[in-house]
Amino acid sequence: MKICIFGAGAIGGAVAAYMVRAGLDVTLFARGATLDAVRDRGLILRTADDEITTHPNVTNDAEEAGVHDVIITTLKVPAVRGALSSIKPLIGPETVVVPAHNGVPWWYFYRLPGEWPKQNLDSVDPGGKVWDGLGPERTLGCVVYMGASVPEPGVISHLGRPDRLGRFPVGELDGSESQRVLRVSKAFKTAGFESPVSTDIRTEVWYKILGNIGANPISVLTMGTMGEMYADDGVSELVVGMMYECYAITEKLGITLPSTPEERVEGYKRPSDFRTSMLQDFDKGRPIEIDAIVGAVAEIGKMVNVETPFIDAVYALTRLRAETASSYQAP
Amino acid sequence: MKITVFGAGAIGCVVAGRMASAGLDVKLIARGKTLGAIKKQGLTLLTGENHEVVKLQVTDDTSEVGPQDLVIISLMANTIRPALPAILPLIDSNTTVVAAQNGIPWWYFHALRGIWPKIHLDSLDPDGHIWKAIGPEKVLGCTVRMSASLPEPGVARYSEYQTYNLGEPDGSESGRLVATADAFATAGFNAPIDMDIRKSVWAKICSNIGVNPISVICNATMEQMCNEPRVCDVMRAILREVLAVAQKLGVELPADIEENFARGARLGAFRTSTLQSFDRGKPIEIDSIVGAISEIGRMVGVPTPQIDCVYALTRLRADVAGCYLAP
C-alpha cells in the first residue's frame, strides 16, 4: 500500500517518520528547506530518549510521484486549497483521501442526514473547491491527537510517551466499516499509533473541536501557555461559555458529546507550558487556523439558529490579532 | 495657589507644562529618565506644528515640596496605591485633590445617594486604602479628554482638543471647584464645571472600555479596530452592557454608540493609552476601566458576559507580558 503524507509540518513529519520506521511505503510531499533537508540527511525524529533518522521517499513533484493508495493531507487548513493542483496527480480511482486537520472538516455535510442550507462552509471551503478537487466520496474522516513541533527543517520533535505516540480515530463519513477504513486504521496502528475505527467520526470531530475552540484562539490573544490559560478563572469561564455554545450547536446537529464543559475544562487544569498549535503557527508568523476551528463553528451556529456571542467575540478579536501580525489567510 | 502634578505620564506632563507656561506656581513629580530629561533641558510640548520648551520645577522628593493647595494625581489608577507614601506629604486638610484617572474612580461611592453593598471596589481600591489615606472629601472628580503620548523622555505630544471636566462628587458648585477650574482654564484647557461628574466618568468609560483592552489583545490601532465590523459588534455588545450597569446606578447615557466608532476610525493609527503603556512594558489600566464595570454589574445584578470575556483575555495577556499590576 503506497501512502503519501502531503505536508511535512509537525504532524505530517511525525506520522511519516513513524510509518517509515514500521516499514510502510511512504512518500512525504515537502517543499523548500524541508525538502532539501530530508533529501540530504533523511527525516530526523527526536523523541524523549532517542533520535532516529528515517528515509521516506520525499518529493515536491506530484506527477513524478504518481498515484497513491492513501493520501493523508497534513497541511494547515488554509493551505489545502492552494495545494489542490499538486495533490490531484496523486489521486487515482481507488485512492483514499484522509484529511488530518483541526476544526470543522470540508467534508462535514457530505451525506449527512437532514436538510442543510449549504454543504460548503465559507469558513472552510468557499465555493467547494476542495470538495470538488479531492472528492468526499473517496474521503475518510480523521481526527488528530498528537503534539509535535518542528525545531528545524527536516527535524521533528515528538516528546510524547513511547507507549502513547498519538491517536488518530478514522471513520467512513457514512459510519460504515469498509475495507478501506480498516486498511487505513491498520497503517496508523502499524506505525504505533492508536487508531480506532469510528462509526461516528463527526462526534470525534466535535470532541476535538471542543478542546481547540477556546484554548487555541485564546492562546494567540493572550500568548498564554495551556497552564497559564486554565489557571486563570476568567479565561476558564470564557472557555466554558464557548463550549456551551458548541453544545447548543451539536445538539441541533444530533451529536451527543460525553462530559460537560466544566468537566472538560477541569481536565485541562494542570501545569503545562505547552503552546497550542495555533500559537506555534502565530509565533512563526504563519497563517493560523482560525476559520476552520472558530469561524466555521460560528457559521454552523448561524445555519442552525444558535447564537454564539462568545465564539463570535473570540473569533473577531483573534482574526484582527492575526491580521495586524500578517498571520491571517482567508479560506 | 500652589499646585503639584503627581505623575509624569503624557497627561501629567502636558498639564504641568501648560500650567507652568501660563505662569502658575506648579511643580511636577517625576522619576527616572523623565525627571532627568526635564531637569536638564526642560519639558518639550508638541501639538500640531507647535513646539514649546517649558522650564518647569520638577522633583521626585515630595517631602521637600510639602502640602499643596491643589494636587493633581495623574497616575494610572492601579499605580496610586503604591505611590501613596510619596503622595501623602503633598496633602493636608486644606488640599484639594484632583483625581484624573480613567475608568471608575476610587471615590465613586462617596456622597452618592443610595444604599450600596460596598463602597470600596476590589478592582480599584480593595479595603479602601486609598480612600482612607487621601480622604474622598478632598477630591474633585475629573475626566480627561485629550490624546497625548510621550515620544521620548521629557517630550510630550498632545492633541489640540483638550477638555478637563471637573466636578464635586456631591454635584455642588464649591469655591475650590471654581478655583481649580480657573487654574485649568488659565493654562488654556477647556475646563467646564461639571454638575454631574459621574455621568462624564461613564461617558469616558464608554470611549475606553472597548478600544483600550482590545487594542492590547489585538495589538491594533484605532482605525484597525473601528473599521472592522466584527470587532465593532463586540464593542457594541460591551457598550450595551455598560449602559445597563450605569442605568442601575441612576446614570442615563446617550446611546450614540455608532458615533464612537466613527470618531475612533478618524483617529487613524493612534494607539490607545493602554496599548502605549503595554508597549512600554508598564502596568495597564485594565481594572478601573473594565474590571470595575463587571464588579459593579455583579453588585447591581446586571450580567456583563462580553465585558467579562474581554477583561479575562486582556488581564491574562498583560499577566503573561508582565504588565499586570493587581489593584
Image (cartoon, rainbow, N blue to C red):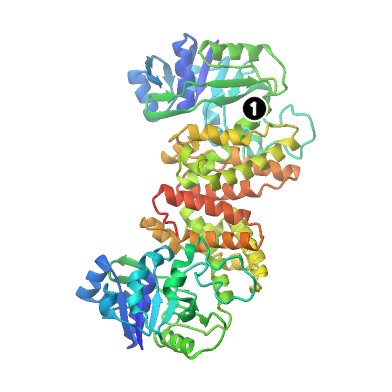
Q: Is residue A309 above or below residue A250?
A: above
Point out residue B14 in the picture as x, y percentages from the top left corner: 46, 21
Q: Amino acid at mark 1?
A: Ser
Which residue is at a point 48% across and 14% down the rendered structure image? Answer: B19
Report if residue A240 is visible in the image: no
Q: Is residue B179 above or below residue B315?
A: above
Point out residue B317 in the picture as x, y percentages from the top left corner: 49, 49
Q: Nearer the viewer, residue A234 or A174?
A: A174
Would residue A97 appear left or right of A241 to someone viewing this image? left
Would residue B186 appear left or right of A251 to someone viewing this image? left
Which residue is at a point 42% across and 54% down the rendered structure image? Answer: A328
Farthest residue toward the right? B115
| Residue annotated with mark 1 | B200
Which residue is at a point 61% across and 35% down the rendered structure image? Answer: B206
Q: Nearer the viewer, residue B191 or A300?
A: A300
Which residue is at a point 64% across and 23% down the rendered structure image? Answer: B139
Residue B258's image quarter?
top right
Q: Secondary structure at mark 1?
A: helix
Disc 1 crowd rating (10 Å Cα; few below 14, some 14-19, many 20+) is many
Q: Chain of mark 1?
A: B
Point out residue A240 in the picture as x, y percentages from the top left corner: 62, 60
Would residue B17 appear left or right of B294 to someone viewing this image? left
Point out residue B252 in the picture as x, y percentages from the top left corner: 72, 32
Residue A200's image quarter?
bottom right
Farthest residue toward the bottom? A179
Report if residue B87 is visible in the image: yes
